[in-house]
């Protein structure tokens, strides 16, 4: 129970921090869970750049194949890099949890439900992945506008490059000074242009939102049928009510 409470508190700390420090604008991810090509690219980026440390243990490779329109062989060839994994295996990082705790000083969070835990969902992930900036005061050399003092390094820096954040200092009515973010300024180019990186982050976000609720599209599809059934049932019930009450004066 204590462990569960700790996980919940760690999950909401970033949101609490944002509330205390002022709201952060989140860019719209505009994802499309029905876009199988986007899910394919997003799964590839997740495996290549995220699974070195993080797991998505509530997702199995066979579900990725089903959602992204891939065959079992394509999933094994592109996403599964160890011989002992099967198509029904969970997406678990090769990093040992004990090693992760020793090296980073904390347990590495599983990312399966990130899109559901974070305030803003996919928009939070999308903005977060674009908001790393150079900060020499941090152990990793970077910080993040959306998640201040984040412990994770900028693993996508080779793609995005490096940017610095420009702040302005404002004074409130009580005379306290606050730094407010204004804009980013590119200081080192990456292998992708800004437009290419934006598409890549959107694909990765699309996959992470899907992973947090793989049955969302099916749930929405069934919801339409349920609403149609209820509408038809309402008409029949109303007609039956009129038939029963027609002789009542």
Image: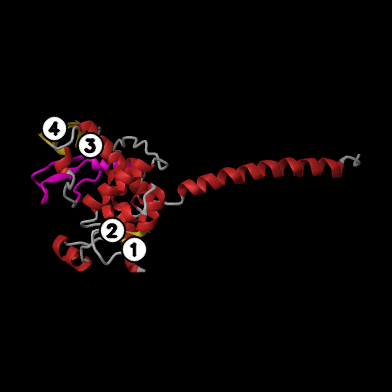
Q: In this view, does 89 lie to the left or right of 129?
A: right
Q: Which residue lies furthest to the front in this view?
A: 73
**Residue that appears at 46% across and 48% down:** 216
Q: Mark 1 vs mark 2: which is more N-terminal?
A: 2
Q: Distance between the residues labelled 2 and 3?
A: 23 Å
Q: Distance between the residues labelled 4 and 1?
A: 40 Å
Q: In which quarter of the image is the N terminus?
A: bottom left
Look at the image and say whether residue 126 sits in the magenta stretch: yes
**Helix, strand or loop for disc 2:** loop
Q: In the rendered structure, are the residues bearing label 1 and label 2 in contact, judged by CB atoms less than 8 Å apart?
A: no
Q: How far apart are marks 4 and 2 (CA)?
A: 31 Å
Residue pointed to by mark 2: 55
- Kindly indicate the quadrant of the structure image that contains residue 178: top left
Measuring from the top left, give residue 90's x and y in whole percent. Answer: 33, 62
Q: Mark 4 vs mark 2: which is more N-terminal?
A: 2
- How is colour applied across the structure in the image? secondary structure
**Residue that appears at 38% across and 43% down:** 36
Residue pointed to by mark 3: 197
Q: How many marks?
A: 4
Q: Mark 2 vs mark 3: which is more N-terminal?
A: 2
Residue pointed to by mark 1: 89
How packed is label 2: few (under 14 Cα within 10 Å), some, or many (20 or more)?
many
Question: Which dot marks residue 186?
Answer: 4
**Helix, strand or loop for disc 1:** loop
Look at the image and say whether residue 110 sits in the magenta stretch: no
């Amino acid at each position: 129970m204590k462990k569960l409470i700790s996980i919940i508190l760690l999950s909401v700390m970033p949101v609490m921090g944002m509330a205390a420090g002022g709201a952060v604008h989140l860019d719209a991810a505009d994802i499309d869970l029905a876009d199988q090509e986007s899910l394919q690219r997003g799964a590839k980026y997740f495996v290549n750049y995220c699974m070195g440390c993080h797991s998505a243990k509530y997702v199995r490779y066979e579900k990725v194949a089903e959602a992204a329109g891939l065959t079992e062989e394509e999933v094994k060839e592109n996403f599964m890099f160890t011989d002992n994994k099967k198509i029904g295996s969970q997406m678990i990082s090769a990093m040992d949890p004990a090693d992760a705790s020793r090296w980073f000083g904390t347990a590495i969070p599983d990312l399966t439900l990130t899109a559901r835990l974070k305030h803003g969902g996919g928009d939070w992930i999308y903005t977060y992945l674009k908001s790393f900036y150079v900060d020499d005061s941090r152990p990793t050399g970077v910080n993040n506008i959306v998640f201040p003092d984040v412990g994770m390094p900028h693993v996508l820096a080779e793609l995005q490059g490096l940017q610095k954040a420009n702040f302005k200092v404002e004074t409130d009515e009580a005379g306290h000074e606050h730094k407010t973010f204004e804009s980013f300024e590119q200081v080192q180019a990456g292998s992708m242009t800004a437009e290419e990186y934006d598409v890549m982050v959107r694909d990765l976000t699309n996959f992470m939102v899907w992973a947090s609720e793989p049955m969302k599209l099916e749930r929405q599809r069934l919801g339409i049928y349920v609403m149609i059934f209820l509408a038809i049932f309402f008409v029949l019930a109303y007609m039956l009510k009129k038939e029963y009450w027609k002789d009542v004066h």
